Amino acid sequence: MKILTGNDLRSGAVTWWNGTGWSLFVDDAVDVGDEVEEILAREVATRRVNVPYAIEASIDASGHVRPAHIKDRVRALGPTVRRDLAVPTADKTGWDWVI
């Protein structure tokens, strides 16, 4: 599956394409399939995010979206050295895949 990510232009927060806009939560990310270039072109023009790009991801056994590359896993959940800076979420189960 392919998902889109970028950084919010106002806050700098990592964001994920949810099908209609940008979310702070990786679990909201949707598979963009063959529409990658179309969505990226439109979103670059709207200037809501900084340098959006497509990444490979999968859905794990718990139903969480899991970016394929370690860099994007860290971006999804926040710093690995201070848990108090991690991205807040209602369900923290199944998030042991960062490393």
Image: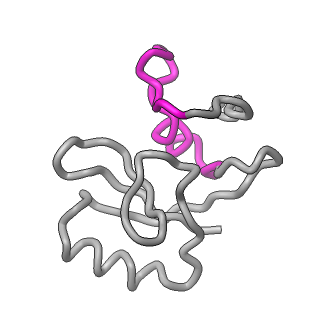
Residue drawn at x 37%, y 45% as measured from the top left: 14
Q: How is the image coloured?
A: one colour
Give the position of the C terminus as an image quadrant.
top right
Residue 78: give x, y in percent of width and height: 46, 30
In front of the other: 77 or 19: 19
The answer to if 74 sits in the magenta stretch is yes
Residue drawn at x 51%, y 34% as measured from the top left: 77
Residue drawn at x 63%, y 58% as measured from the top left: 57
The answer to if 72 sits in the magenta stretch is yes
Q: Answer with left or right where residue 23 lies relative to residue 47.
A: right
What is the span of residues highlighted in magenta in the rendered image? 66-89
Q: Answer with left or right where residue 97 lies relative to residue 18.
A: right
Residue 75: give x, y in percent of width and height: 46, 40
Give the position of the N terminus as an image quadrant.
bottom right
Name the image quarter holding residue 42: bottom left
Q: Residue furthest right?
A: 61
Residue 51: give x, y in percent of width and height: 28, 61
Residue drawn at x 37%, y 59% as measured from the top left: 22
